[in-house]
């Protein structure tokens, strides 16, 4: 992002926005981004960073994350690599930008970067909302020859979001989030926001779809993108997720004719 990063919105800002404009378009990608930043733990980011780094050689330096969101993984990667994140959700990018992390506003399926990265990664929160084939193709275009892609994708919506009710509070507000995940991966989320001082309350609803794949889906997606040495496998401690690794081939010149 260009220019001086501004203060990211707070939980109170998010709740006030919903109460002030109950008919507006509110959701986790926009107004309620502070709730996402609050709920994504450091442990989540560190676990995904280990997932990525365990598939990379020691000489990797520059890493691009496609769909970095509020920056939990990007922050963890930044302790080891020269890490850059790209995302098309401006409200999410304000959080890593405020921490001084390198972020770029752009489509994760078409990142505005040069093919200069040693590694590119995308985890299940990205491939749940962006077509996995498009993510693989974007990773290939962003890598230098010989670079490595690590792509994690959900095989079950529960790997990204589960049905249930959660309550968050602070700064005089109460936010209740009720999630209903249908078998097709269609997700309905109701947010009830209450101002504890005035008693004012309102409910807004967000709907989305969680895209899923399989080992047999991720493997050809990496292959079609142009990767070689493709390996896709599950993670024993991450049920409902498959992880693929592929190498962008090193271009070699054809031998000169004699």
Image: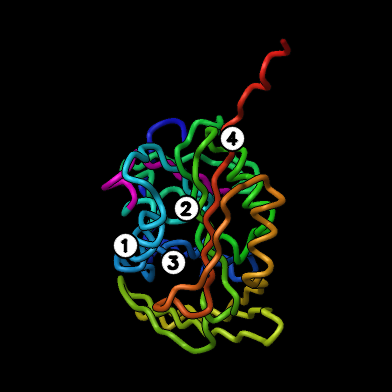
Q: Residues within 10 Å of mark 3 (few under 14, many from 20)?
A: some
Disc ID at residue 112: 4
Does residue 82 appear to the left or right of 245 in the view shown? left
- Label 3, on which residue? 36
Disc ID at residue 46: 1
Does residue 221 appear to the left or right of 202 in the view shown? right
Between discs 2 and 1, the one toward the N terminus? 1
Q: Residues within 10 Å of mark 4 (few under 14, many from 20)?
A: some
Alpha carbon distance from label 2 to label 4: 14 Å
Alpha carbon distance from label 4 to label 1: 26 Å
- Label 2, on which residue? 68
Is disc 2 in contact with disc 4, using a CB cutoff of under 8 Å? no
Between discs 4 and 1, the one toward the N terminus? 1
Is disc 4 in contact with disc 3, using a CB cutoff of under 8 Å? no
- Residue drawn 52% across the image and 69% down it: 233
Dot 2: element: loop
Dot 3: element: helix
Q: Which span is picked out in magenta? A: 77-88
- Residue drawn 50% across the image and 61% down it: 123
Which x, y percent locates residue 49? 36, 58
């Amino acid at each position: 992002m260009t220019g001086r990063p501004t203060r990211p919105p707070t939980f109170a800002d998010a709740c006030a926005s919903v109460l002030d404009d109950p008919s507006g378009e509110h959701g986790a990608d926009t107004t309620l981004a502070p709730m996402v930043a609050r709920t994504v733990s450091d442990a989540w980011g560190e676990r995904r960073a280990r997932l990525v780094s365990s598939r990379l050689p020691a000489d990797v330096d520059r890493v691009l994350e496609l769909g970095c969101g509020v920056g939990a993984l990007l922050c963890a990667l930044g302790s080891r690599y020269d890490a850059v994140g790209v995302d098309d959700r401006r409200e999410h990018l304000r959080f890593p930008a405020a921490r001084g992390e390198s972020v770029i506003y752009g489509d994760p399926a078409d990142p505005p970067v040069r093919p200069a990265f040693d590694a590119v990664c995308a985890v299940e929160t990205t491939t749940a909302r962006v077509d996995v084939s498009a993510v693989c193709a974007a990773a290939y275009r962003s890598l230098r020859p010989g670079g490595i892609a690590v792509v994690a994708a959900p095989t079950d919506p529960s790997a990204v979001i589960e049905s249930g009710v959660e309550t968050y509070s602070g700064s005089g507000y109460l936010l209740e989030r009720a999630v209903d995940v249908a078998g097709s991966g269609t997700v309905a989320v109701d947010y009830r926001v209450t101002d504890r001082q005035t008693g004012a309350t309102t409910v807004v609803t967000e709907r989305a779809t969680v895209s899923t794949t399989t080992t047999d889906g991720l493997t050809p997606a990496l292959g079609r993108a142009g990767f070689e040495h493709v390996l896709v496998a599950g993670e024993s401690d991450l049920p409902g997720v498959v992880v693929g690794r592929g190498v962008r081939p090193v271009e070699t010149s054809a031998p000169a004719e004699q």
